[in-house]
Amino acid sequence: MAKIFIYPATSLILSDLVTRFGHKPLGSAIAIRERVQTPGLESSPLQITPEEPKKGLRWAAVEVPSGVRGRMALYGPMVEECDAAIIINNADLAFGCMGCARTNELLKFLLRQKKIPRLELEYPRNEAEGVQFVASIKKFLTEPGVIK
Amino acid sequence: MTEYNQAYTGTVTRYVAVESYTVTPVDVAIRAYEIAKGVMIKENCFGLVIMGKEEEVDRVIAEVRKMDPIHIFVKDRGFPPGDARRCRATLGGARPGFNGIEFEMTILPYISNGLGKTQNLDTVTVPVPAKAPSDRRLDVYTLKRMIDAQEP
């Protein structure tokens, strides 16, 4: 069972398909759960404390806004941990504030820089594209030799 | 800052989204309640939220998925069900994060169709795009041309 980073990190479709084809999806829920279930200082709603932007310095420079560094403290460890990645480009649901947008750009950059198997797709808009979308993911996740 | 006391340590929470024309979220909820055995189940408009020990949650999900395997979808959730920081009962309005699920629910029929058609398909015959497809969004130059083409 390999660890697959999914982008958008909250995607229901990618999370389901990765699990369905026998691997572990790495998404934002895992990082949030870790923080919600760990004792510390009250920092509602996501338990992102002032420590997180410091941890984010590992993936983003000090002049990068703290919002990006804080988010990278969630995603950075998963990017390092993952064995492969599936990216959906131009995902409408990944739209957000500037912090989200820049973090998304940095995330995709880091995933592309990392020498791991990567599949890039777009959301299907009709049934034919839906078949190709699922088939591409199935092939990527189940074909021997693609993911170690 | 005050001290934070966590709850439900060691548990996992998963969403079960139902996009089926034969099974409703109520049917899935009833089946899940039958086999719950210590797992917390909350029914909502698009499916269920299930929380408990990982192996127990996976057992319940595996069982309810059998009702309609290609139309029931599952994803992880960070917060437990009814958490005051996320639950719309305390916040009012749509729950933060629902927009993503709402968007993907419109695509789920294509995915279900794809899952059905690729079940017995040899992956060697599957056409996979060699590179990322080009950006299909409306670019600013095309928009300008469209505006200019409008009659006054």
Image (cartoon, helix red, strand yellow):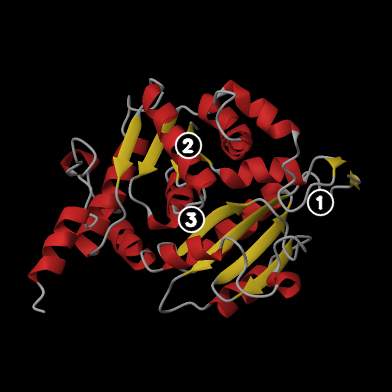
Of residues A47 and B79, the one nearer the viewer is: A47
**Disc 1 sits on a residue from what chain?**
B
Q: Which residue is mark 3?
A: A12
Of residues B8 and A9, the one nearer the viewer is: A9
Which amino acid, mark 3?
Answer: Leu
Q: Is residue A55 above or below residue B126?
A: above
Measured in 3D between alpha carbons, the distance from the residue under mark 3 to the one under mark 2, in whole angstroms, is 13 Å
Report if the CB atoms under discs 3 and 2 are less than 8 Å apart: no
In screen coordinates, is B38 left or right of A23?
right
Q: Which residue is mark 1?
A: B8
> Element type at marker 3?
helix
**Residue visible at 29% across and 39% down in the picture:** A139
Using the rendered image, report if marks 1 and 3 lie on a common chain.
no
Where does residue A111 sit, x and y in percent of width and height? Answer: 42, 29
**Disc 3 sits on a residue from what chain?**
A
Of residues A10 and B136, the one nearer the viewer is: B136
Q: Is residue B31 above or below residue A106?
A: below
Q: Which residue is mark 2?
A: A5
Give the quadrant of the C terminus of chain B.
Answer: bottom left
Is residue B49 visible in the rendered image? The answer is yes
Where does residue B118 sit, x and y in percent of width and height? Answer: 27, 53
